Amino acid sequence: MGNGSSRGEGRGRRDTNPEAGEDKEWTFLATFERQYGSSTHPFFYTCRFPEALKIADEERKFVFIYLHSPADRHFTPAFCKHTLSSDRVVQYLDDNFVTWGALADRGEGRQMAKTLLRPGTFPCCAVVAPAAGEDMTVLQQMEGPMSPEKLVEILRRTVEDHGLAFGHERAKERKRSKARAKEEEKLREEKLKKKKGQQYY
């Protein structure tokens, strides 16, 4: 994933029409970089959230969600300038997470703020684990001001506490998927044999 310190363009599908709509993937990143610059920040995946979950599942990582509220003038500016853009946080996120951001007042970010995370204050961050299909599990949610050291400490503890269980659960899911595929193949073979047997009568 790289060090992320100069990846202003992000990764994933980019919309070719910046005026096309309010919930496009580029909107959060453009807003963030307009306010805080593009030289140093985590490697935000510029894709829809289900795609970020899929990438995390494939890479066996958790997703770090950052809900950004441009209207918040109390804690968000300091968090973005001094915590989210610190070298320590950038490196830890880029090495261990699929990082995804959204605006809390539009598109997927607004939906997430209203139905999943429901933050009481901003900034709001969360760590989620991919589950079967497009489901997910919220492992940790953080709100309000936070130092780089505190954020990395919480993230590291979350990975340590849930990483092993997450790996075991994904292994069990793969085992169940293989068992289902094997059973389906067995049923197809039995139907084929039955069909061939009927042709002789």
Image (cartoon, rainbow, N blue to C red):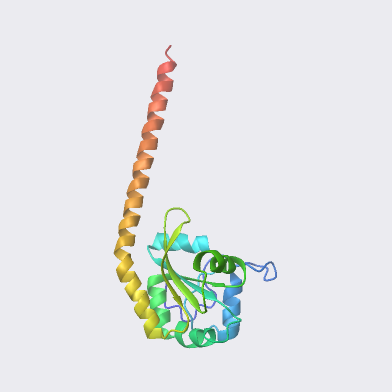
- Above or below, 149 against 103 in this view is below
Looking at the image, residue 97 sits to the left or right of residue 117; the answer is: left
Residue 169 shown left or right of residue 138 in the figure:
left
Where the C terminus falls, by quadrant? Answer: top left
Identity of the residue drawn at 47% across and 74% down: 125
Residue 101 placement (x, y as % from top left):
52, 72
Of residues 52 and 157, the one nearer the viewer is 157
Query: Residue 64 lies in what quarter of the image?
Result: bottom left
> Outermost residue, top direction?
201
Which quadrant of the figure contains the N terminus?
bottom left
Q: Position of residue 195 (x, y in %)?
A: 43, 21
Q: Nearer the viewer, residue 63 or 126?
A: 126
What residue is at 53 percent from the left and 78 percent from the top?
Answer: 8
Q: Residue at x 58, y 65 (%)?
A: 111
Residue 103 to residue 75: above or below: above
Answer above or below: position of 112 versus 184: below
* Residue 64 visible in rendering: yes
Q: Residue 39: x percent and y percent?
A: 51, 85
